[in-house]
Amino acid sequence: MAFIEINDLFKRYKNVVAVNRIHLEVEQGEMLTLLGPSGCGKTTTLRCIAGLEKPEGGDIVIDGKSMLKEGFVPPSKRGIGMVFQNYAVWPHMRVFQNVVYGLKFQKIPKKEIEARARAVLELVGLGGLENRYPGQLSGGQQQRVALARALVRNPKVLLLDEPLSNLDAKLREKMRFEIKSLVRRMEITAVYVTHDQAEAMVISDRIAVMESGNIAQIGTPVEIYESPANRFVADFIGTTNFISGEILDTPPVPGTIFVQTGFCERLRCRANEQAELLPGTRAYVSIRPEDVEVRPEPTGVSENLFKGTIAHKAYLGNIMVLFVDMGDTEVRVQAPYHVAQEEGDSVFLYLNPEKCVILP
């Protein structure tokens, strides 16, 4: 049995369905991220787990106990720690007071409260700052206060609702690794909400991509990136090229499909086991820019090598981004920064067939 089980969860706001009968499991000690655009239902799902929203249907089970079936269990009784987007720290209280505030109502001895607080402040890197006010801290330090306040209660589950979105880019990147390391060291079960794809890829054991209240795909970061279930997932996670085409007769080689496109008669692709694609049907080929190889001459391979013209070129420091005109399709390529060809030059593109994924 999973540590958190979400079964047939349904939540609506008037005529808008926010969460549409989703099923989800989170294993003990796992960091699961709910990822998707604004309005997809990820924060509503998190708030239902926390008990801050009451769903109209389904069930939420935490550590074997239903939060709904035998009466609605309030947030304070769910064994949950929550970190919000806006820190929500008390500006008139010192760091120590902010962290221990929730413990004062639990009839915990004063010495134990102090020991817990000092231990968790050391854990999040705030040792020695317990007497400062939030206004005397950086944004990253204030977020650590919010994290310490959630952890000091020894929660069964840690819920994080876009906790890094108010930080600058460099600090956000640093805090991703810190939160991931902290959750692993504590072996705590965590559910993390974000719309930032890079953040989800770094921090997650598994990702649940949400779209319009539904779960489009669940998998590890590698599975989501390398084998997207549909165009929405492929487009939302990272950058990809979509090449429109028609499925040709399935060849005798298992796991291989050929597609006729606007610029070629036969593009060899890897079959997508999650999609039923019959000969003659329209489909899309997804291939990431880093999986397209630029070659000045048509040598080395006998298939998936096509001629195009560089339409645009952008230098990004460690890489060069090329936009190659293939007739009816423009293919984005992530090439080495020292590529010699210029705009208007002809090049050959090798589309790795193992990286060409068929999507409905």
Image (tube, helix red, strand yellow):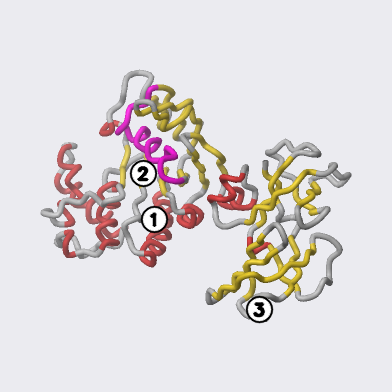
Q: Amino acid at mark 2?
A: Leu
Q: Amino acid at mark 3?
A: Glu
Q: Residues within 10 Å of mark 3 (few under 14, many from 20)?
A: some
- The residue nearer to you, when weighing 242 against 173, is 242
Q: Residue 341's image quarter?
A: bottom right
Give the image location of residue 25, x and y in percent: 50, 35
Give the image location of residue 209, x and y in percent: 51, 43
Quadrant in which the C terminus appears: top right
Circle nearer the viewer, 3 or 2:
3
Q: Residue 124's image quarter?
A: bottom left
Between the residue at mark 3 and the residue at mark 2, the CA separation in whole angstroms equals 51 Å
Q: Is residue 60 above or below residue 256?
A: above
Give the image location of residue 277, x and y in percent: 74, 38
- The residue nearer to you, when weighing 219 against 189, is 219
Q: Is residue 195 magenta?
A: no
- Name the residue at 39% across, 25% down: 66
Residue 357 seen in this snapshot: yes
Between the residue at mark 3 and the residue at mark 1, the CA separation in whole angstroms equals 43 Å
Between the residue at mark 1 and the residue at mark 2, the CA separation in whole angstroms equals 11 Å
Residue indicated by mark 2: 158
Circle nearer the viewer, 3 or 1:
3
359 on left or right of 248 = left
285 on left or right of 222 = right
Q: Which residue range is magenta in the image?
A: 37-56
Residue indicated by mark 3: 342
Q: Amino acid at mark 1?
A: Ile
- The residue nearer to you, when weighing 117 against 336, is 336
Residue indicated by mark 1: 179
Q: Is residue 48 magenta?
A: yes
